[in-house]
Amino acid sequence: QSALTQPASVSGSPGQSITISCTGTTNDIGGYNYVSWYQQHPGKAPKLMIYEVSYRPSGVSTRFSGSKSGNAASLTISGLQAEDEADYYCSSYTSTTTLGGVFGGGTRLTVL
Amino acid sequence: EVQLVESGGGLVQPGGSLRLSCAASGFKVSSNYMSWVRQAPGKGLEWVSVIYSEGSSFYAPSVKGRFTISRHNSKNTLYLEMNSLRPEDTAVYYCVRDLIGGEHDFWGQGTLVTVSA
């Protein structure tokens, strides 16, 4: 069982917006602003999409945005495109023994 | 351009050992936090180990005492020495560069480790 909880799957049609949730505790998401999101296409390495809750690395589309409220974080993808179909993982710094951070179990995004 | 290229994966018997390497280019391994993250087949991501720029290292409870992370500064290469391997260590192992908050901003292509008799 993963330390952070994500829905197993979400779906949306091209052009629509979707939001993926990520729920943790005061020991991770609720206590620190080091929440990140990763996109992984099948057979490929993950790619950092959001860091420090809401910052986008250079080259990441502005259609991707992140936010946090209490012990939960969210990734929103607007203007869905076929290429957005992938697995998405959230991660957070944690005050527990897992110094490298904790991941969510992943969410499969299907673009209908 | 930042690049991370892993090597050293393969098939190993339970109880065996393996050393993974990660050759970096475009930045200095010694000046950054560097981690190994693994992904079992069909499963999610799991952080394995980190080495900080000042040299201290930390491990996930599942590998502590069996795995050792290290780096060779002049070769600009990161390593993961894995001993007493178990079937549950079977995974693709990714070499990653970390930001200060532990976020992983660059990933290698991964190397597959299979532990099986």
Image (spheres, coloured by chain):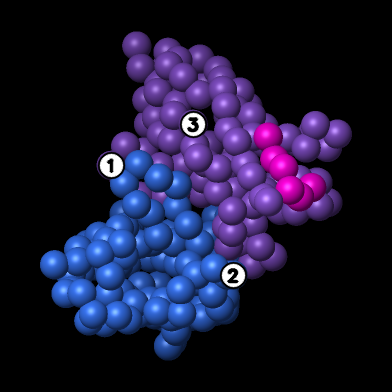
Cα separation between marks 1 and 2 = 29 Å
Residue at image coords 64%, 29%: B21
Does the rendering let one see residue A23? no
Label of residue B111 in the image: 3
Query: Height in image: B72 above or below A78?
Result: above
Pick the residue in front: B116 or B110. B110
What chain is colored blue?
A: A
Which residue type does callout 3 highlight?
A: Thr
> Relative to A37, does residue B16 appear above or below in the rendering?
above
Secondary structure under tag 1 reads loop
Q: What percent of the width, then of the height, locates residue A23?
A: 36, 74
Q: Chain of mark 1?
A: B
Residue A58's tag is 2
What is the CA distance from the residue labelled 3 to the residue labelled 2?
26 Å
- From where the camera sits, is residue A77 visible? yes
Can marks 1 and 2 be said to lie on one chain?
A: no
Secondary element at tag 3: strand
Q: Which residues are magenta?
A: B23-28
Q: Closer to us: mark 1 or mark 2? A: 2
- The chain that appears purple in the image is B
Name the residue beneath numbered marker 1.
B42
Task: Residue at the far left: name it.
Answer: A112
Left or right: where B46 falls relative to B22: left
Gap between marks 3 and 1, in whole Å? 15 Å
Marks 3 and 2 on same chain: no
Query: Which residue is at the front of the view, B85 or B43?
Result: B43
Label 3 marks a residue whose chain is B
